[in-house]
Image: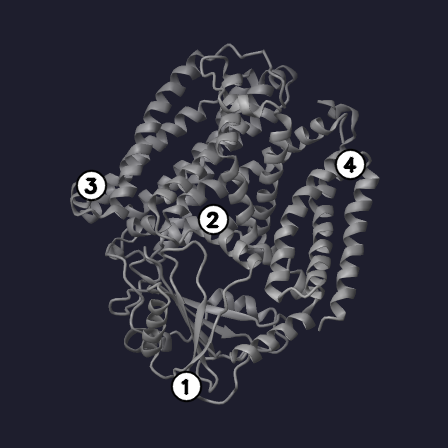
Amino acid sequence: MRTATLSGWHIASRVVAGVVGSYVFTWGFVALASAGLLTAGLEFHEGTNLASMLGLLVYLSALCFAFIAASLARGWLVLAGGGALMTLAGWWLSRSLA
Amino acid sequence: MFANFRLSLTWLHTWFGLVLGFVLMVAFFFGSMSVFDREIDRWSLPETRIAAQPMPSFDHILAQRFAQMTEPEAEQRAAAEKRVTQPLPAQLTASNWNAYTTHRDPVLLTYVGFAVPHSTLPDDTIYAEQTIDPRDGHALHRDQLALGSGFFYPMHFSLHLEWHDIGYWIVGLSAMAMLAALVSGVVMHRKIFREFFTFRPERNPLRSTLDLHNLTGVVALPFHFLWALSGALIFVGIYFPVVGAMMQPVVEAHEHEEALHSGLDHDPSGKPGTLASVDAMVAVAKAHWAGKGMPGEVGFLSVNHVGNSNAYVSIYRDSTDRVASAEGLHFAGATGKVLFEDPPDGPVTTVNAFLVGMHLQQFRHWTLRWLIFIGGIVSCICIATGFIFFVEKRKTVHARQGRAGSRWVDALAVTTVTGMIAATLFVLVANRVLPESLADRDLWQKSAFWGAWLVLLLHAMWRSSALREARRSKAWAEQTWIIAALALAAPLLNALTTGDHLGKTLSAGYWPVAGVDLMLLLTAGIAFVTARRLQRSTTTDDLPVAQEPEHA
């Protein structure tokens, strides 16, 4: 395998992106999906359960994505940036629900 | 990350699979043990070797028992003291009483919830727990350890690492790594259908290890995927408490609406109230289920807002004949009138409850129970052969270059494969050997397990020096001999200390204990044959194989 061409820092960053970056991304997904599904009129447990169940598959996809993303910077941007944006959007949507 | 998609996922498979594979071994092995947790409980608690019992009378047995449970568990109270803004009162008041049983339980789990006032967490509750004999309500001795449901089962999902629930997080991440390893494993092997039928035991050990890894991975692929996923789903509320953490007003609005709709108050009224006959409510519930064409027994019973005028009693049918747990029927505590019946679940919640129920399998179906056990063992074989392949592939190069990587992987593989099985058998032996009157007998048993496992780790590390010359560590054979000896000793000690030898349990048809004994003897037999073969091949194994198939 061609690990020799990659620095230890690069690999460590991929691993952290895969584990922590994916967590941030999934958190954002669950927030946005929960708020979105409740706004769309789903019953509370139906909406939140669906968001969490899909969240696990989103985490799995994000974990794989962190390793196949062409550039490390783009991987981090999508995972952390996307996660933060979705968290914000989910929170903003949820304010009109209560 | 690497030149292409497939190589990147191969890296993910190798390294996440290796590092978290040690955790996955623990999760899948003790998960497999947990399939028969109630049976292992009977083996380890001889005084509970009686037939399964239904939920006992609340009015005659449970009410007195709950009234005596006035103190939460000391460690839970200590933890709660750290998250309150005002000191906890010396005496907390019980807020709910709960009793839980299944079709395999001769004993009943009871627990009492105490609301923690002035907590920084919403709805903070701590508990007192007690296992009782439902025939007369007497409490089982606290120092007794139910090895199946009290030790192996929590190990399966929490590793007994309680600090900040860190064990749950490690196991959850490992479940995700398992899913990623399955996805990447499928991507790596384009000839997946052919590999399903490929096993070449006579070829070199590297090739046959990989064949077995692929075969066990593919043959039970749906099991591996669904059990890792549903396991993570059970604790998804711990991993992603998103709605509770970010959208508390939405949660409160929902709780308020639900309380209005159902008539079940979310908070206690604060005014004293009395409790009508709960047995009468149980009779109404049973008649209601029978009327719906699904007669059944009570699985879970709870009294909420204990002592308050708005107390209510929730009664749930058990899950003996269904995968997901059933809807509850709720009664006004003061009058015994039906307040509310949970509506049928929506489609999403039905799928969720099915996945969770499938994983927890409280239904009565022994064929499925065995298939799930076998699935868990196949997962263990898949993970273990992954370790062995990792070592076999690298040991020659590592030995030549003086690198220690494959040596330490081999030591950890021995520890989590043979070492874990031997430590598990050791705690069964300790359970039979430690005197019944010993104080803290539960702690002694747990210490026996951890102590034995630590010794086997040191043994594996010591013996792994053979890897420096690319030879096989003798620890594999030696620990397999230990397994054979312990697995033979455990049923003998059971017969000696309890008199319940196989002749007796088999002729009485008492399968919980007979089954554990028979599985132990089978383990001893397999270990004996394996140890002999390992010993023979370890002594003749001086020719490391250089040929490497295309795989990482």
Q: Quadrant of residue B518?
A: top left
According to the picture, the residue beneath numbered tag 3 turns out to be: B502
Mark nearer the viewer, 2 or 4:
4
Disc 3 or disc 2, which is closer to the eye? 3
**Image: B143 above or below B271:** above
In this view, the mark in front (3 or 1): 1
Q: Does residue B110 appear in the picture of this structure? A: no
Element carrying mark 3: helix
Does B123 sit left or right of B357 as displayed?
right
Residue at 33 percent across and 64 percent down: it is B295
Mark 1 or 2: the one toward you: 1
Is the residue at mark 3 from the same chain as the one at mark 2?
yes
**B410 w.r.t. B533: above or below:** below
Q: Amino acid at mark 4?
A: Ala
Label 4, on which residue? Answer: A69
Mark 2 falls on what kind of element?
helix
Q: Quadrant of the N terminus of chain B?
A: top right
- Whether callout 3 and callout 4 share a subunit is answered no
- Left or right of residue B125: residue B128: left
Image location of residue B12, percent across then percent down = 66, 33
* Residue B479 place in picture, x, y as percent: 40, 29
- The residue identified by callout 1 is B334
Above or below, B57 against B107 in this view is below
Looking at the rendered structure, the number of numbered marks drawn on it comes to 4
* Separation of marks 3 and 1 at Cα, in angstroms: 51 Å
Are there few (<14), some (14-19), or many (20+) residues within 10 Å of tag 4?
some
Q: Secondary structure at mark 4?
A: loop
Give the Cα separation between the discs numbered 1 and 2. Answer: 41 Å
Q: Residues within 10 Å of mark 2 (few under 14, many from 20)?
A: many
Q: What's the amino acid at mark 3?
A: Leu
